[in-house]
Amino acid sequence: MIKKLNWEYDAKYSFFLVDEIESTNTYFKEHAEEYPDKSVLIALRQTKGRGRYNRVWKSKDDITFSILLKHNASYNVIAPLALCLALSGFGYDTGIKWPNDIYLQNKKLAGILIEDVYQESFSSAIIGIGLNMSDKIEFNAIGLNTKLSKYEIIDAVMNKLSELTKMDIKDVIELYRKKSIVIGKMVSYHDKLYKAIGVDQNGHLILNNDSTTIHVSSDEIDIKESLR
């Protein structure tokens, strides 16, 4: 059963909690009209959480939540940056691996899935965040391994999300560049090598080689493409 939380922290959102659910993103997609803008659904356990390409991600002790937003923005840039900046406030030096993974000490710490809902035109955006609280050795993934409350961390993320949404996109892109672990490196994309040289105003990754410059949207690049 989903219950509304009396949020004791700073973020000005509507917070909801569920003990167990298949996927918070899926739930919001199916029930978006029933919830107000800036709703956050936190799951203590997800049984069929989804990553990119419909990969299944199960969670019991980690931080898993989805954010429902009914105003459009460059969330593909804003969301990972908000998570990184929030964690920086707790002393974690994280970076963004294109398009939506957060890394700590060269290991994956968190993943973000952003989905838009359309009803003839844009209706809402749903940002799903899965953050490891413990190491996942079998996946070469790292956790925060902290005594911090998961609600304290979520509150920090939501506050950063609010701040970034109000900023000029040019300033957001500049902050993103500083947190990117891809920009400036060579990447393999469609069996060709490129150098990642930046992010454009639409939040697309800019790749360059001797023959061309291309702009790649988040749904066009395979997260498994190797850095070299």
Image (tube, rainbow, N blue to C red):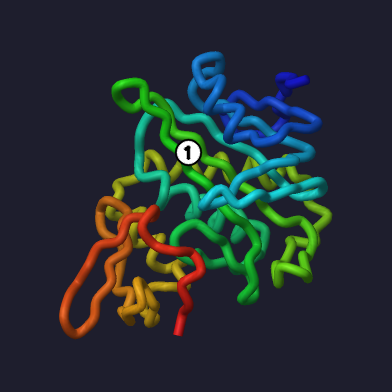
Query: Which quadrant would residue 116 be assigned to in this image?
Result: top left
What residue is drawn where x is 50% and y is 16%?
33
Residue 158 position within the rendered picture, expressed as x and y whole percent measured from the top left: 56, 40
Residue 5 position within the rendered picture, expressed as x and y whole percent measured from the top left: 73, 23
Q: Is residue 196 left or right of residue 180?
A: left
> Which residue is outermost to the top?
34
What residue is drawn where x is 68% and y is 50%?
57
Residue 204 position within the rendered picture, expressed as x and y whole percent measured from the top left: 31, 57
Query: Which quadrant would residue 11 be assigned to in this image?
Result: top right
What residue is drawn where x is 33% and y is 74%?
196
Residue pointed to by mark 1: 162
Q: Nearer the viewer, residue 148 or 102?
A: 102
Seen in the picture, residue 122 relative to 205 is either above or below; the reply is above
| Three-letter amino acid code of the residue under disc 1 | Ser
Seen in the picture, residue 69 relative to 53 is either above or below; the reply is above
Numbered circles on residues, count: 1
> Which residue is outermost to the left?
211
Label 1 CA crowd tier, 10 Å (few <14, some 14–19, many 20+): some
Q: Nearer the viewer, residue 228 or 173?
A: 228
Q: Nearer the viewer, residue 156 or 201?
A: 201
Residue 141 position within the rendered picture, expressed as x and y whole percent measured from the top left: 70, 67
Tag 1 secondary structure: helix
Q: Quadrant of the N terminus?
A: top right
What residue is drawn where x is 39% and y is 78%?
187
